[in-house]
Image (tube, grey):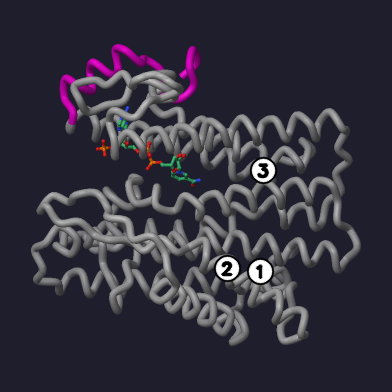
């Protein structure tokens, strides 16, 4: 692809602004009015707790249905995203910059001293804009952090669906494309099915809302996690039956470990006596779970996620490193994140964490790392 073409493709048009306005408008309205389990978040430093309405799955399915009907009635083109990917990318990037500048200004002017809205200003503009000023900023009653991550995960699915529509339209639907689409769709649907688990994750409880998070949610997740789909539109891969079976196994094992580990921790936080794999849990210092997946490695959930990421790329074969962008990025991210979380937990749990480290010496992959 030549540079001139790329630069031209990146210029935002009114069409891409329109797509984003409709998407975010829908999410704001659906998130506010559709029914969903209201889940209390973790207790913040000042003792307060935010509540999250977990109606992401319903919002997603309703939007898929609405878009499906719209496409059937020729009101919209299912390939609109796949045909304007670059300009949607640049428009979303510009939106992220604008939103985070507003967040920066609003955060600096906040007088609120509660944990959610208390401003954390170092005085270094770039640092404060990048990492954010406030923990849980809101807009018209919408928790923006929860909103953006939801938008990013849904955006990923809609890009994939549009890429799928394009490959059907071009009559080059392949087994690789079907596997990639199936694995990602299952992963995203599962994410929304268990959306309440998100309320206790690092991003939600510990990270302030700045450019790093907003860009990560709105641009990075949908546009880079879907590289395999874009790549398959222009490349043919022949998969053997053995490769397909192996690929499905990597997905399945990854899913079991990822979901199993996250579920065990979530259940443990709610009920520290709940049985794990049919036995009473081993608990350290009354606070940390050391059985099930959490007795195998201190971040087994990261291992599951990495296997899943690999399974999304394997359908593309091994002729190019490009489709492996996501697993490689995730490996770097999760190794870095594990170190940060380890430091945080060591400080929070002190000798209890030291005991946990002694009992469970592996960070992510038993006998290796
Ligand atoms: P975790 O869900 O692993 O949460 C870490 C926290 O869990 C710790 O800070 C601690 O918090 C608590 N904890 C850690 N060990 C134990 C234990 N043994 N017993 C009880 N509590 C424990 O981390 P993340 O939020 O980073 O990740 C959540 C999921 O999201 C993971 O599966 C990860 O793979 C995925 N993810 C995916 C990304 C992607 O780009 N695809 C990016 C980032 C994450 P506390 O102080 O509350 O006890």
Percent of width and height locating residue 86: 64, 69
Beta carbon at label 3 within 8 Å of ligand 1: no
Give the side of residue 101 with respect to residue 21, left or right.
Answer: left
Asked whether residue 78 is drawn in magenta, I would say no
| Residue nearer the viewer, 60 or 158 | 60
Q: Is residue 229 above or below residue 255?
A: below
Residue picked out by circle 1: 85
* x and y, in percent, of residue 219 in the image: 51, 62
Seen from the viewer's position, the closer of residues 249 and 310 is 249
Q: Is residue 362 magenta?
A: yes
Which of label 3 and label 1 is nearer to you?
A: 3
Q: CA distance from mark 3 to mark 1?
A: 20 Å
Q: Measuring 34% from the left and 20% from the top, which residue is drawn there? A: 280
Cα distance between the residues tagged 2 and 3: 21 Å
Towards the viewer: 328 or 301: 301
Sequence-wise first label, 3 or 1: 1
Q: Which residue is mark 2?
A: 89
Determine the secondary structure under disc 1.
Answer: helix
**Dot 2: element:** helix
Q: Is residue 7 visible?
A: no
Q: Is residue 220 above or below residue 349?
A: below
* Extent of the magenta region: 349-369
Mark drawn on residue 312: 3
- Look at the numbered discs 1 and 2 and tell me whether their residues touch, using CB distance below 8 Å: yes
Residue at 27% of width from left, 48% of height from top?
A: 206
Q: Would you say the residues marked 3 and 1 are in contact, meaning their CB atoms lie under 8 Å apart?
A: no
Of residue 49 and residue 145, the one placed in the foreground of this image is 49
């Amino acid at each position: 692809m030549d540079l001139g073409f790329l630069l031209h493709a990146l210029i935002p048009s009114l069409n891409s602004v329109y797509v984003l306005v409709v998407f975010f408008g829908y999410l704001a309205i659906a998130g506010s009015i559709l029914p969903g389990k209201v889940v209390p978040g973790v207790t913040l430093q000042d003792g307060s707790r935010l509540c999250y309405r977990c109606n992401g799955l319903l919002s997603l399915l309703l939007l898929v249905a609405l878009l499906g009907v719209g496409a059937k009635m020729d009101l919209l083109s299912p390939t609109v995203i796949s045909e304007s990917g670059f300009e949607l990318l640049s428009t979303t990037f510009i939106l992220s910059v604008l939103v985070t500048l507003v967040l920066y200004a609003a955060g600096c002017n906040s007088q609120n001293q509660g944990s959610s809205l208390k401003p954390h200003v170092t005085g270094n503009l770039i640092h404060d804009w990048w990492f954010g000023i406030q923990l849980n900023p809101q807009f018209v009653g919408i928790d923006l952090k929860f909103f953006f991550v939801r938008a990013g995960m849904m955006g990923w699915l809609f890009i994939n669906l549009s890429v799928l529509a394009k490959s059907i339209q071009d009559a080059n639907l392949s087994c690789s494309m079907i596997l990639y689409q199936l694995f990602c769709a299952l992963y995203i649907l599962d994410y929304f099915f268990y959306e309440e688990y998100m309320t206790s994750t690092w991003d939600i409880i510990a990270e302030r809302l700045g450019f790093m998070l907003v860009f990560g949610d709105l641009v990075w997740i949908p546009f880079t996690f879907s590289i395999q789909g874009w790549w398959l539109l222009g490349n043919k891969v022949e998969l053997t039956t053995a490769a397909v079976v192996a690929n499905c196994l990597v997905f399945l094992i990854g899913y079991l470990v990822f979901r199993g580990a996250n579920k065990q921790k979530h259940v443990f936080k709610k009920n520290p006596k709940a049985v794990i794999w049919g036995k009473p849990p081993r608990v350290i210092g009354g606070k940390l779970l050391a059985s099930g997946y959490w007795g195998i490695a201190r971040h087994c959930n990261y291992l599951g996620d990495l296997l899943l990421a690999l399974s999304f790329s394997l359908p593309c074969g091994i002729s190019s490193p490009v489709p492996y962008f996501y697993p490689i990025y995730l490996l770097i991210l999760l190794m870095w994140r594990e170190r940060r979380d380890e430091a945080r937990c060591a400080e929070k749990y002190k000798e209890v964490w030291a005991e946990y480290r002694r009992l469970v010496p592996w960070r992510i992959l038993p006998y290796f790392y």
